[in-house]
Image: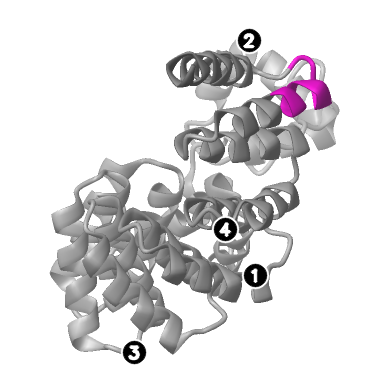
Amino acid sequence: MAALSPLRRLVTAVLVLTLPLLTSQCSKKSPQAPAVQGLTPDQAEKFQALHDPWPDQKPKPPEQLPEDRLEALGDIALKNRNFENSLINYLQILQEHPERYDLHYKVGVIFLLSGKLEAAQKELALVLVHQPEMLKAHEAMGLVHLQGKQYPLAIKEFQYVLAQDPKRAKTHHLLGGSFLESGRPDRAILALKTATGLDPRQLSSHIALAQAYLQQKDYPHAVASLKQAQTLAPKDQKINQLLGRALGAQKQYPQALEAFMRAGDEAQAYNNIGVFFFMDGQYEEAAKCFQRALELRPTFYQEAKTNLQRALEKMQETRKNGS
């Protein structure tokens, strides 16, 4: 709020003292501004204009920005993730035009992005009651259910959208993600393969597809998906971590170590590859890797120390049984 001018501050200070005087002198409109102690005649005239009880002399409320300007400001704020300002602008319009369901949709998206799932669901439900053909509102409702782990409801929304428009790569991705999170990698693979076919440059779809293959222990296909993802983002840490897992599971240890290294943490890379050696029964190699991890980072977390101790115990056990 803008700071009060000296005149307005003075008016506020003397208002209580002068109110009886104004009441007695304003029984009819006076052509002359009343003299108020402490104010000049010009200030007194402005004071009367502000506080005269006649309607034609009441101050006008500040003008509201045009509707299109408010919406544009709201859109800019939403794009910049300034949710509070965006919401303020949209709600100003909705006060006058509650039938603007396109804006109700945007308000629902703001609640969704802010993690207010119940409020988002109510707003989007209102939109879908009046405009059930708005596919993006169904997608947003699906995302609300997905974030709330209501996987059957999320799947139902995404399937409805695809029944109307089967070429929506984003919706195929969301459907695949819903199947993946609900533990149905076979259905996830079908949806995500369609998504990557429609939009080969959608990195997140390639990664999700690889994760679905990993859930099924289909490591060759997981590697193929991750290699495709690498062409889009060679230095992405998540891609290289997943690639290391897929290669390690196939006992391609040098390639797996290289992938883990590209994920950005050499000590972590040696710990990871040591786990694969351990699972393969190569306890001596596992111990070397865990030891190397601790040499690279002496303060490495407890997991590496525990892994090293387990590997050494297994080595001793194996030697004892072999002697």
Q: Which mark is residue 230?
A: 1
Residue that mark 4 sits on: 243
Residue 227 position (above or below residue 40)? below
Please say if the residues under marks 3 and 2 sit with CB atoms less than 8 Å apart: no
Element marked by disc 4: helix
Q: Which mark is residue 167?
A: 3
Distance from disc 3 to disc 2, alpha carbons, whole Å, reads 73 Å
Give the left or right position of residue 26, taking residue 265 as reference: left
- The mark nearer the N terminus, 1 or 4, is 1
Of the pair 79 and 37, the residue shown nearer to us: 79
Q: Amino acid at mark 3?
A: Lys
Residue 293, position as x, y percentages in the image: 73, 27
Task: Name the dominant secondary structure of the magenta segment.
Answer: helix
Please say if the residues under marks 1 and 2 sit with CB atoms less than 8 Å apart: no
- The mark nearer the N terminus, 1 or 2, is 2
What's drawn in magenta, residue-wise? Answer: 291-299
Report the residue at 19% width, 63% height from top.
155
Q: Nearer the viewer, mark 4 or mark 2?
A: 4
- The mark nearer the N terminus, 1 or 3, is 3
Element marked by disc 3: loop
Of the pair 123 and 23, the residue shown nearer to us: 123
Give the left or right position of residue 103, taking residue 66 as reference: left
Q: Based on the displayed image, in which of its 4 quarters is residue 216 positioned?
A: bottom left
Q: Please rate how many residues cluster around mark 3, counting C-alpha atoms within 10 Å: few if below 14, some from 14 to 19, many from 20.
A: some
